[in-house]
Image: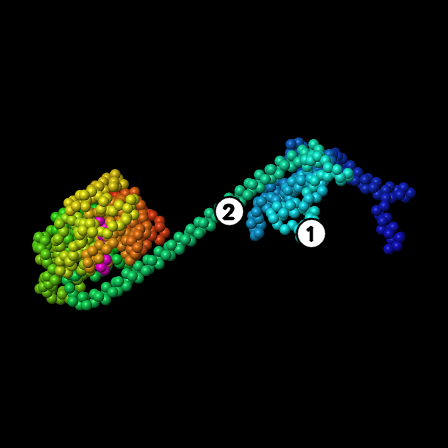
Amino acid sequence: MSSHGQQSARAPLEPLTTSEPGPSKFEIVQNALFSRFSHRRHDSTKILSDLAPVIMTPRMINETANAHMRRQTMGSLPPPPSSNSKLDFATLGRTPKKFGSRRITSGDLSIVEATEDLLSQEIPEPVGVASDVSLLRGFNATIPSAEQGKVRRRQMRSVETPRIGLKRLGMSARGLLTDDDEHDGQSVTSEEDVVVVPRDAGKGRRRGRESLSTAKTLGRDELTRQSKEIIRDKENIHVKRSLIHGEIAEISNKIAALDAIRAKLEQDLLKLHEDELELDDELEGVKERLDFEQSQLPQKASAQAFQLPHTSRRRKGPAFLPSEHDELPPGVAFMTLDGHTTPLTALDFSEPYGTLVSASQDDAQPRVWDLFSGTEIGRLRGHSGAVKALQVEDTVCLTGGEDGNVRLWDLRRVDTEPAEGWADEGELVTLSEVAEEDEEGEHERDPEAAAQPTSVRAGKERATEQDDCCARVLEGHTKAVTALYFEDDCLVTGASDKTLRQWDLTTGQCVMTMDILWAISHAAPQRSSLPGGILPNSLFSGAAASVGSFAVPKPPYADGSWEMYEDFVGGVQFWGYGLVSGSGDGAVRMWDMRTGQAHRTLLGHSAPVTCVQFDELHIVSGSLDKTLRIWDLRTGGVFETLKYDHAVTALQFDTRKIVAATGENGIKIYNRTSMQHSTLQTNGHIKPVERVRYMDRYLVSGGRDSVVKIWSL
């Protein structure tokens, strides 16, 4: 571009010279503004006087213009702003105030204006990686100069001295190879490994030892500054400590949450294990029922009137429950049978919602109940004393009483009215005679009825002349029968005469007698698990081990009551040729039913054993010593011991749980999979429980409150 073009481009920006005629541009603009606003001199003067000393911001300009327009519209002026307003810009901007060494600008005032709005805004939560940033790292990033003060103070306190290799000294002190050894005495010490010592470099003369701290002199201002820096560093340490404690607490909360999740998953695993065990039991029950149905085919063709059930008490499932049973709340007693007037001594039932037989202390007539309707069907009349033990299988019931007799009952012939006949007199008859008499009577009344199933003929048999339901009486024990167990045609009983008897139910004969006193006296020397290794027969007085009466006081129940315990044999059970018994000497014995000898004695209880049961792997026994012991059947040792506050009077177990009566109002349940304890007490007994019996998810209990409760597990 030519110089002329450049001059013409700059010409509008240059002021007019005085040689040109007429007023200047500035004077023209000023005169125009003056003539335009001359009629509003007062208002314009007011505005300029208000705004002249203030640094204006965009918001202030808009607010001032809006206020001026409102004053024009309303025709009145508002009162002047108060001096204590938050945004008193006349005070802030009238003088050139400073932030540090910088003047206040309109940008600073804009920030002041927006502060309140910014503080009221919600801060969004960080997402992604920002949410995992440590507060301590954020603090260190926010205050990067937190460690600079320490470095600066060290540099200020350092002194100038000849260099000595600290690295070489440290390595030589540890016996390591130094650089001087590698380079034949030539030092290769770096400048980072040195410290300084004073030395007279001028004359090389020695002088007295001086402290390194006196080599550097610091002024008062520097010491004051260092003091403030140290205090600030301590405050930073306090903040860091608080942040670390906060992170530790957060980690602890996360660990607790993960532990809770882990515990929940472990409970799920245990539940799956329990479901698997339940399926195994159900499969076993289905197979047993299939075998039973196959064995019943020829018997159905013969249509016998009365026969012993070929079932096993070891069967755990499946239980045939009505669909409404699933709607019952678990752990609640949904039915109460209150016909008894004294504490319960024995009970058992055939199946869920089937037939229940229960006996009490001062009642020689056990009661028969229909669990489907909850009504009493009738009573078993024949014993002259209280019934201490009973077992129900299908439509057959065996009872053992204080009179020393064992009676076999046909529950299909139960009648509410007493009957007169041979059964009340205790006449011994065989099952074949009963069957022949029933068949003869059936043929006389209805020839076609002989081919009907026994369940169909059950109602008709009540009208026969032999209408009493006692089918057999077994005599032999001299004292009260306190325990019994039967499978198929084999029965084992235990009595207070300190003997065990094996019976053949088809002939009614006693096959074998096992003397517990003889087993005690001829037992091989063994050390028990009791303190001092004492033998169980030394736990009791001579009366307990003699042929005379046996009686020991029971520990108090939960309600404070107590009584004498006189049942020397607390429980018996057999499987095949193996028999297990629990007796008043505190021992659990394993017998061989082929020889009648006790081949193993399990010692550990310190009081009479009141109940016992075993399966393929374990023996479970309860005692008056307030413990329930699980024995390893293979080794004879104690697998586990459960302790309670009161005596254990009854138990039953399977692969998943142990149900026990422990002298309290509630029923104790121990989960063998999760090893957790629970108690059934909702709508339950008001006095301690004495007897329990369950099948699958259906449980029956009898207590000292003289009532029977039906539970849903």
Q: In this orientation, which residue lies closer to the viewer: 693 or 530?
A: 530
**Amino acid found under the numbered disc labelled 1:** Asp
Residue 685 rendering spot, x and y as whole percentages: 26, 44
| Residue under the point 14% across and 62% down | 305
Mark 1 or mark 2, whichever is nearer to me:
1
User: Is most of the magenta stretch helix, strand or loop?
Assistant: strand
Between residues 110 and 474, which one lies in front from this camera angle?
474
Viewed as shown, does residue 146 lie left or right of 97? left
Q: How is the image coloured?
A: rainbow
Residue 101 in the image, given as x and y percentages of width and height? 72, 38
x and y, in percent, of residue 9 in the image? 85, 51
Q: Which amino acid type is marked by label 2?
A: Ile
Answer with the quarter of the image where residue 442 lies: bottom left
Q: Say left or right for 336 vs 257.
A: left
Range shown magenta: 576-583
Which of the two residues, 633 or 628, is positioned nearer the viewer here? Answer: 633
Dot 1 falls on a residue whose secondary structure is loop
User: Residue at horizontal 45%, vertical 49%?
Assistant: 259
Of labels 1 and 2, earlier in sequence is: 1
- Using a 10 Å C-alpha cutoff, classify the residue at mark 2 as few (fewer than 14 neighbours), some (14 to 19) or many (20 or more): few
- Label annotation for residue 251: 2
Side (left or right) of 472 relative to 206: left
| Residue 395 screen position, x and y as percent | 19, 57
Disc sitting over residue 635 in the figure: none
Which residue is under mark 1?
A: 184
Which element type, helix, strand or loop, lies under badge 2? helix
Above/below status of 296 relative to 531? below
